[in-house]
Image (cartoon, grey):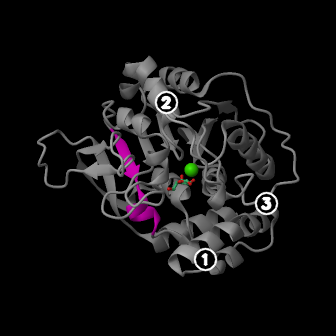
Amino acid sequence: QEKLILDVDTGIDDALGIMLAVKSGHFDILGITTVCGNVSLEAATENTCKILDLLGTEHIPVVRGASKPLMRRPHYEHRVHGEDGLGGALRDVTAQTRPAEGFAPDFIIEQAARFKGEVTLVMTGPLTNLALAVMKHPGLVSEVKRVIFMGGVVRNMGNVTPTAEFNAYADPEAMKIVVHAGFPSLTMVGLDVTRQALLTDKHIQMLGNTPIARYVRESTALYMRRYYERNGVQACALHDPLAVGVALNSSLVSTKKFYVDVETKSELCDGKTICDFQNRLGNPANVDVCLEVDSRKFLQMFTEVLQS
Ligand code: BDR
Ligand code: CA
């Protein structure tokens, strides 16, 4: 089993990413760390605990992290994820799982030092916790095995502003720190590929009528409605689950290493991720950018794992 820390701002699709990670059985999940993003830190933490209850796991620590971006005010996404962040699906439930003591950036540092070279980090929210961790302990970059993050977009439009993806937009300074930190293996799972990982009613039907299937159906209803309003397609993008999918099976995507930077000082383009495809700046490549995805294979993996 591969050691994993999942960093989330739970969020409808973060929740589905957690489910994929836990139910795959592939990972020894050292902890799930939470961050302010789609919803407040407290709501993201509560939602994470509710999902672990639903999955029936009692041993995975949930560790709170940053309650705001490094330098900005929080930018929540209630329009997409609902008031509670899970599309209302577990609104009337109180989580039984309780968060553990500790602070996410310190937890990441401790676990990476404890299991040197073994820990995979999958980040599906703004990168505040990881940025705080590398600022406190720059040696972290050579202690983790690899980092896979959902965020950014390099060949396409944004989903918050015309140019920026949400996780990049919510804390661009943090993403900038992470891409320049010097991680030997840093994979960006951006909108370029996640927009192709579309969950439809057909997939949801394949999940059957288990509590998990019912949860998925209920929590994605609003998410699908928003997607339909914008794209005219009855579906929703599995952004965060695809980052987990890449950790499970890297052959789902094809990647190429480029120099990537993040805009932080622009009136219109804050949070834009810039990929230097032609190496015009002459800087060394720092990010493995996902360019193509086998979405059929990914959706098959996703539905099989959630059925099991
Ligand atoms: C990302 O933004 C959030 O709203 C989702 O949870 C996902 O992590 C997609 O841009
Ligand atoms: Ca997320």
Count neighbours of disc 2 (C-alpha within 10 A) and say few if under 14, some if 14 to 19, many if 20 or more. some
Which residue is pictured at 66% across the width and 31% down the height?
Answer: 64
Q: Nearer the viewer, mark 1 or mark 2?
A: 2
Sequence order check, earlier mark of 3 and 2: 2
Q: Which residues are magenta?
A: 185-195
Q: Secondary structure at mark 1?
A: loop
Residue 252 seen by the camera = no
Name the quarter where the N terminus is drawn.
Answer: top right
Which residue is pictured at 42% across the width and 21% down the height?
Answer: 135
Q: Amino acid at mark 3?
A: Ala
Do the numbered discs 1 and 2 sit on residues whose CB atoms are within 8 Å?
A: no
Residue at the disc numbered 1: 200
Q: Nearer the viewer, residue 110 or 153?
A: 153
Which residue is pictured at 49% across the width and 52% down the height?
Answer: 166
Which quadrant would residue 180 be assigned to in this image? top left
User: Against 10, is 193 above or below?
Assistant: below
| Relative image position of residue 285 (x, y in whole percent) | 21, 42
Q: Amino acid at mark 1?
A: Thr
Q: Secondary structure at mark 3?
A: loop
Disc 1 to disc 3, C-alpha distance: 18 Å
Q: Which mark is residue 70?
A: 2
Confirm or reject: label 1 Cβ below 8 Å from ligand 1: no
Is 188 one of the magenta-colored residues?
yes
Disc 1 to disc 2, C-alpha distance: 36 Å
Q: Is residue 174 left or right of residue 26?
A: left
Do the numbered discs 3 and 2 sit on residues whose CB atoms are within 8 Å?
A: no
Residue at the disc numbered 3: 89
Name the quarter where the C terminus is drawn.
Answer: bottom right
